[in-house]
Image (tube, rainbow, N blue to C red):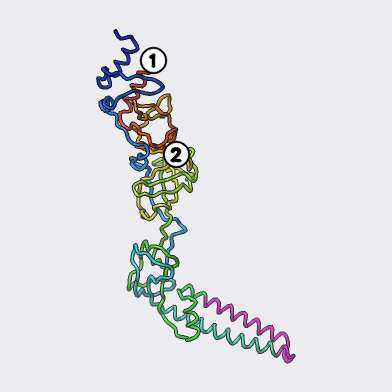
Amino acid sequence: MLKAPALRVCRVVLLLGGLCAAAPLFAANEIKLSAAQAKAMGVVTAALSSSITESGKGLPARVVVPNHQLHIISAPLAGLIESVAVAPGQAVKKGQALARLQSPGLVEIQRGFLQAATQAHLARESMNRDEKLFNEGIIAESRYLAARSHYAEAGAALSERRQALRLAGLGDGALQRLERSYAMSSVVEVSAPVSGVVLESMAVPGQRAEAATPLFKLAQLTPLWLEIQAPIALIIGLQPGAVVSVPAYSANGKVTQIGRGVEEGSQTITVRAEIRQGAENLRPGQFVEAVLAANGSGKHWHLPNSALVRLRDQPHVFVQTAAGFRIQPVSLSGESADSSVVSGDLKGDERIAVRGTSSLKAMLQGLAAGGE
């Protein structure tokens, strides 16, 4: 005849699938359970090490270009867009021509530059001549000082005109050729200030553009930012440097900034991360699912919420052993609608019960009660 504790154990097993014929034993937080019994109870396990990349839904995030890597290229002068040399999505190098404009205003600036260059040349010669006469005592010092002042003013005017031409897109080589040959041109070449990728082209051949009209949006795409919408509960203990991954695109990075304001509708906080590894797999404006760890140190695992059970308000997981399952406490670092990030005394090569955990919990509690 069965004693009372053994009878209670048998009743629990019968409720979970009629396995009383081989009633498991409970010792040291471990359930002794055969593979056949676990299958009959609907228990499914998954490798802990692979749960990071095979996780369920992560946190919603948007890929953006860092502000300092985004460049808006505008028309330096008013004119007619003659041709466009690039298209959206095309990679360009620093100094590469993007478009050509016909601008009558460029001719006027060049004329002003040549006049200023001539005036500066005459002022320099006049100053040199007066300096020689002053040294010989032929003229008064005031006349020499006036000539030197006039030369300084002419030099300042020349520098102003030279800078205006640089802003119009002329390089030092083109300025030197203009000064030597006096050959003026109405063609303005719009070139890339940095190497990057053309995100958007607003320039249309045949269109008239005013000065400062945006023509291209150019970006450097490494690194990229992730703007993650994280629940308030998840950022408790979160620090800059925490590991962030986008498993679907093999991209990884670290948290750089944690927002202070809360979105009223979703009650989430924007967490910004910098993605360096795998940034080439992401696209600006893309929406992805990001996995966020609580801090940048220690090991964290991403598990489906179905793998977690709570005992005395402490999250636990069931670790598969040779004889059955062992209950293991873990620390909850963060959670989303379908998954959680945990840390604990785990090696990383264990298999964790991800389904049927309610049955294992009921069995554990029943066995514990029977042992009282």
**Is residue 142 on the magenta stretch?**
yes
Q: Is residue 336 above or below residue 280?
A: above
Whole-percent x and y of residue 20?
27, 17
Q: Is residue 155 above or below residue 246?
A: below
**Is residue 65 on the magenta stretch?**
no
Among all residues in the image, which is located at the extreme right? 137
Quadrant location of the N terminus? Answer: top left
Mark 1: which amino acid? Gly
Quadrant location of the C terminus? Answer: top left
Q: Residues within 10 Å of mark 1 (few under 14, many from 20)?
A: few
Among all residues in the image, which is located at the extreme bottom? 138
Q: Secondary structure at mark 1?
A: loop
Q: Residue 339's image quarter?
A: top left
Q: Secondary structure at mark 2?
A: loop
From the viewer's perspective, tell me whether residue 326 is left or right of residue 1. Answer: right
Q: What residue would you read off at disc 1?
A: 371
Residue found 38% across the figure and 15% down from its top: 371
**Tag 2–tag 1 contact (CB < 8 Å):** no
Whole-percent x and y of residue 121?
58, 86
From the viewer's perspective, tell me whether residue 276 is left or right of residue 141. Answer: left
Q: Please state the extent of the stretch shown in magenta in the rendering.
A: 133-162
Mark 2: which amino acid? Lys
Q: Residues within 10 Å of mark 2 (few under 14, many from 20)?
A: some
| Most frequent secondary structure within the magenta stretch | helix
Which of marks 1 and 2 precedes in the sequence? 2
Q: What residue would you read off at disc 2?
A: 299
Residue found 25% across the figure and 19% down from its top: 18
Whole-percent x and y of residue 56?
33, 40
